[in-house]
Each structure stands twice: as C-alpha cells, then as structure tokens.
Image (tube, grey):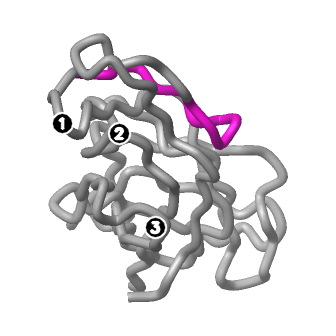
Amino acid sequence: MVKFALQLKANLENVTRLRPEGDDFRWFLKLKCGNCGEVSDKWQYITVQDSVPLKGGRSSASMVQKCKLCSRENSIDILKASLKPYNAEDSERFKTILEFECRGLEPVDFQPQAGFAAEGAETGTPFPDINLQEKDWTDYDEKAKESVGIYEVTHQFKKC
C-alpha cells in the first residue's frame, strides 16, 4: 500500500480557501496499473462517499477495479482527513491538497472540473461551484469591488 499526494499550484487573485465542495465532489483521475503499467485511457472519478469492500472483507476503498490488461484487482482510497484548502499564501507554490492510499494503482493525471469553492480574501464572499476545467476562473467580488480569479492551475503527484 502506497500513498500519493495530489499537489496543486495556482495563482490566486483576491480569493482564498480553494477547496472541493461536498463528499460527492468528483476527483477525475487517470490511473496506472502497478503490475503491468497499463494507463487508463478514459478519465475515471472517485468520491469520498464511495466505498467498495475489498476482497477478504477487512476494509474498503473508494474504487476497486480489475486491470483490463493483466486482470489484477487494484484499489484506490481517498484519505478524507488529508484534505486541505489551497490558500492565498500558497499562491504560485505546490501544496498537497489530498492524499490517496493506493494498492496496485498509481494516479498519473488529474483533471479539475466543477465543484470547487473559494472565498474572497478580504471579504469572505463565498464563490461556490467554481469550474477549473479550463485551468482559469474569474468573477467579481461585489463587497470588495474588485475582480477575483484563479489562474494557471496545475498539479503533480508525489509519493508520500
């Protein structure tokens, strides 16, 4: 069992506490089989609320899948306690926002989509349902009378 950290890097303009909203937030990943090296060609998603029992019935994971190439059963689990927001002071630096516990799988790509939330850095104005699929997002904070945005969103995975 290996842990992988998903690290996010973005340029935040007048917003802070960028985070996924709700346990049904979909983490879109491409996964690689640790046995044969096969990488999924389609985006797969997992959520915190997903729970699939593992063989032997001792524990569960967010996703259990059989490799198309080698037929090995692999699993990945979201470690909910590791979830951290990306804050204004983290801007333009990689920060771990989530960890995955993997058995036979390795996350190799992440695609941010809809379902993120943030708040105005000075005002606390909530900005729900932010879509980061285009790697950029902009809006306007009425209370602060200034534009807000999230730019140049990128990521990397690190072995923990």
Q: Name the residue under label 3.
A: 6
Q: Mark 2 points at which residue?
A: 14
- The image position of residue 41, as x and y in percent, is 84, 52
Q: Name the residue under label 1.
A: 122
Give the amino acid at mark 2. Asn
Magenta stretch in the rendered image: 126-137
Q: Is residue 130 magenta?
A: yes
Residue at x 38% of width, y 24% of height: 146
Provide the secondary structure element on which disc 3 rests.
Answer: strand
Q: Which of 60 and 147 is in front in this view?
A: 147
Quarter occupied by residue 89: bottom left
Residue at x 39% of width, y 80% of height: 3
Q: Quadrant of the N terminus?
A: bottom left
Cβ–Cβ under 8 Å for marks 2 and 3:
no
Q: Quadrant of the C terminus?
A: bottom left
Provide the secondary structure element on which disc 1 rests.
Answer: loop
Q: Which of 34 and 154 is in front in this view?
A: 154
Q: Nearer the viewer, residue 145 or 95?
A: 145
- The image position of residue 112, as x and y in percent, is 57, 43
Mark nearer the viewer, 2 or 3:
2
